[in-house]
Image (spheres, rainbow, N blue to C red):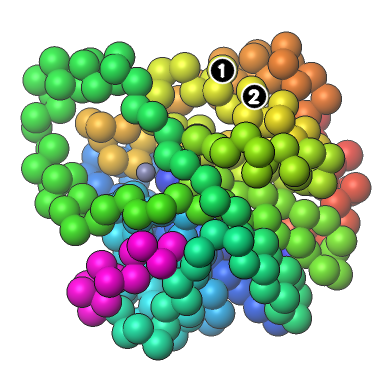
Amino acid sequence: MKFKWLGTAGFEIKFDNMTFLIDPFISRTKGAVPSIPKSKYEFGPIDHVYLTHGHFDHAYDLKEILEKTGASLYCSKTLLNNFIEHGIPESQINPLEGNEQFDFTDYGVEILKSVHTKFGMKVILSKLLNPVTYVGIRQILRMARGFPKGEVLAYYFTAKKENFSFIVFGSGGWIEDIITEYDGKVDIFLAPYAGRYDMHEIIPRMASLFNPKVLIPHHWDNSFPPLSWELSIDKLRHVMSQIVPKVKLYVPEILKEVEIKSFDDFYNSIE
Ligand SMILES: [Zn+2]
C-alpha cells in the first residue's frame, strides 16, 4: 500500500489493484502554504472517494475529480441532495448512514458516525478581530458557499495483503462509545490536527481512547489562510509524549508517496 498526503485532510491510498482518495481538497486558496499548483496533483485511475464531511476544505474539488476519474463517492446521506445540486450524478454517489461495512479486493472499510471539532471562541475572536482576515476572506466565503457540513463520518480501513488497519478522521470530534470500540485495533490513526488553538491537547486525548500504534497528523498545513494557520508539530509531539507515550508520531510530507509493504517495517522506521 502506498499513501500520499495531498495537503489539508486529503490522502491518496493506492493498493495493487485499487486506489481511493479521502477528502481531496486540492484547489487550496491564494496564499496557501505550501502553495502547490493544481497540475501537481496528477491522479491516475481512482476507484473510490471517501468524504468525512461536506465542508469546502474537504469537498470543494469533488465534482471535478469524480468527473475526470469516474470514481464512486462515499459520503453521508445528508449530503446527497446537495451534491446532486452541484451536478454530481446520483449514480456516482453512495449515501451512507454511518454503520456500513464494505469488502473490496484489496481492502475493507467500516463506516463510523462521528462529529465535528467545535471551533474555540479564541479562534473565532482572533480571526474576527484581525484585519488581515478580511483581506482574502472573500475567496474563502465564495468557496465555502454551498458546502454544508452534513453528518460527520470516520472510516476504519483494513489493508488486506499488508495486514494492517488505519482509521481516518477528517475533523477532531468523536463519539466516545464508538471510538472506544476500536481500542487496540488500530495500527495507524490519520489525525485531523486543525481548527483549534488547543488541538495539540485534544488529539493525544482522542488517541488515548483507542491507542493506535502510529499517529499521522494531517490538516495542520496552512491551506486556506487567513482562516487557517500552521499548527505546531512540536507541541503535538510534546503532549503525545505525556499522554500517549507509546504512540509513534509520523509527520507526513505533502505529496510525498510513502510505501508500507509491511506495517512492522514502517513502524520500526519511525524514530
Ligand atoms: Zn470541517
**Ligand 1 image position (quadrant):** top left
- Residue denoted by label 2: 204
Asked whether the viewer can see residue 254, the reply is no
Quadrant showing the C terminus: top right
Residue 267 - label: none
Is residue 154 one of those drawn in magenta?
no
Amino acid found under the numbered disc labelled 1: Glu
Q: Position of residue 51 (x, y in %)?
A: 46, 60
Q: Where is residue 112, by image quadrant? A: bottom right
Q: Where is residue 183, by image quadrant? A: top right
The structure residue drawn at horizontal position 62% and vertical position 35%, both measured from the top left corner, is 176
Q: Which residues are magenta?
A: 76-87
Vertical position of residue 85 compared to residue 239: above or below = below
Task: Return the residue nearer the eye: 267 or 196.
Answer: 196
Quadrant showing the N terminus: bottom right
Q: Position of residue 30 (x, y in %)?
A: 21, 45
Asked whether the viewer can see residue 266, the reply is yes
> Relative to 133, is 153 on the left or the right?
right
Amino acid found under the numbered disc labelled 2: Pro
Vertical position of residue 33 compared to residue 237: above or below = below
Q: Position of residue 16 (x, y in %)?
A: 74, 77
Dominant SS of magenta comes to helix
Q: Is mark 1 within 8 Å of ligand 1?
A: no
- Residue denoted by label 1: 201
Task: Return the residue nearer the eye: 73 or 136.
Answer: 73
Label 1 sits on a secondary structure element that is: helix
The structure residue drawn at horizontal position 54% and vertical position 51%, both measured from the top left corner, is 113
Task: Return the residue nearer the eye: 248 or 210.
Answer: 210
Is residue 80 one of those drawn in magenta?
yes
